[in-house]
Image (cartoon, rainbow, N blue to C red):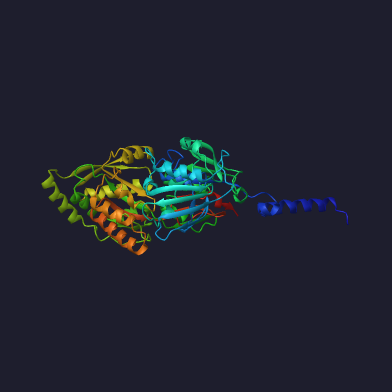
Amino acid sequence: MAAVTRRGAAALLLAATTLAAVLPAAALGQPKKDTAVIGMTLEPPGLDPTAGAASAIAEITLYNVFETLIKVGSDGSTQPLLAESWTASPDLRTWTFKLQRGVAFHNGVPFDAAAVKFSFERAVAAGSTNKDRATFANIESLATPDPYTVLLQLKTGNPDLLFQLGQATAVIVEPQSAATNATKPVGTGPYQLANWARGSAVTLTRWEGHRRAKDVALRRVTMRFISDPAAQVAALLAGDVDAFPRVSAARSLKAFEGNRKFQVLVGGSRAKTILALNHQRKPLDEVRVRRAIAAAIDRKAVIEGAAEGFGVPIGSYYAPGAPGYVDTTAINPYDPAKARALLHQAGKELGFSLPLQLTMKLPPMPYARQGGEVIAAMLEQVGITAKIENVEWAQWLSGVYGQKAYDLTVVSHVEPLDFGNFARPNYYWGYTSAEFNTLWARIQATPQAEARNRLMADAQRLVANDVVSVYLYQPTWLTVAHARLQGLWKDMPLLANDLAALRWL
């Protein structure tokens, strides 16, 4: 080999330094990035998805810390998770689930049929605050013939059962640790809670004891809470956040579109954004007043003001694309003259004068604050003064949702299969209807898809005519992320951040 001169050695060193500057890290044998920071608008009140209504709990824990028998994919399909297979009887009343073997909880306790039995019975026990309690109340009997078989006998056949068992309210918990899951969650998922800095972030770390730990690319994920839209955009642009699912960046998309550093995902949802009305407050218990409020509101203007046009108008509590959907937007169309006439007539008979004084409590989500301002201006035009009170999320959950201390509020219901809320006694709307309860019982007893969809159409028209709420729009979710972060959901049939699917290119 020829000798290398001092000048030649210097040239080689310079070339190597230049090459290192331009080659990606992977090409030089360096490890790929194995951490990520994910943005979230709201901080959850706790980390037990079976004990609270806040969807932010599921955004952190579902499929990450806790697992379910079934997993719902971004396309809405149902896939095996803790259950490796299942069968159902033709009438959809008898379901048999075969469970995964060799699965353990984070505390080392083996997962088995007894844990499933405990979790489902806990969901329907006295004192349960599980928001999908009705799903488990439909279980007539639950048997465990062996440690890896669960047999469910339902009271009425349920074609939605698999999807419902993939939601956060159906996570399987370890009996000994269940009581402390809100602050010390113990599940079977690929991640464990490492730290919760209240008011700032939750950090999850990969659990090396998970059965598929070798397939989980990210070692650590931090969920950072940023409620202000401008701050969300700034964090993305500065690189402080790697991805922000459901980001409030509609007004700032030009900063990301066409920028090779970022990817923008525009996806569908099953969510319903509504102006909720408290039927326990007079005169909101009078249907003419509720119809007047609905007639005063231009849904398209609300979509522009609250979501920069990213939404689809709805006329009932059901999203386009859902099975049995019918367009009911013509039932309560925008008609300010009709709104004024209805208010005048109702005021004469019920003894209230105009302007009607109401309060509108708005949670901190940007769509609610911005949409509430638009709605209040519209109501002012027909003789309703809606005094806006901005509240934090914990106050909304306790005061509005828990204590029904409100007249009006703007909120998105993100759960895809929650039409049964109209039949829930003591729900925060305060709506009671024997006609709806009878119809809902018929729907629950009808497993055949075509007949069930016809009944669902009747239910949509009924709650539209009753104006239980003013149904505004189906949100379109926006996700902005670093271009090299792969595995993010585009469409979101339910709210979840599937962290095990994420990896850096």
- Residue 164 image point, x, y percent: 42, 52
Residue 353 shown left or right of residue 438 in the figure: left
Q: In screen coordinates, is 206 left or right of 361? A: right
Residue 403 % position (x, y): 30, 37
Q: Nearer the viewer, residue 438 or 144?
A: 144
Examine the image and state in which quarter residue 107 appears. top right
Q: In this view of the protein, which residue sits in the foreground, 441 or 189?
A: 441
Q: Which of 355 and 428 lies nearest the eye of the viewer? A: 428
Residue at the farthest front position = 145
The answer, for residue 232, to whether it is visible in the render is: no
Q: Position of residue 314 (x, y in %)?
A: 31, 57
> Quarter holding the C terminus?
bottom right
Q: Write the residue at 29% across / 49% down.
A: 423
Task: Report the number of discs.
Answer: 0
**Looking at this rendering, what residue extends furthest in the left direction?**
348
Q: Is 392 positioned to the left or the right of 79 in the image?
A: left
> x%, y% of residue 105?
55, 42
Toward the bottom, the furthest residue is: 450
| Left or right: residue 488 compared with residue 347 | right
Image quarter (top left, top right, bottom left or bottom right) of the N terminus: bottom right
Residue 371 seen in this snapshot: yes
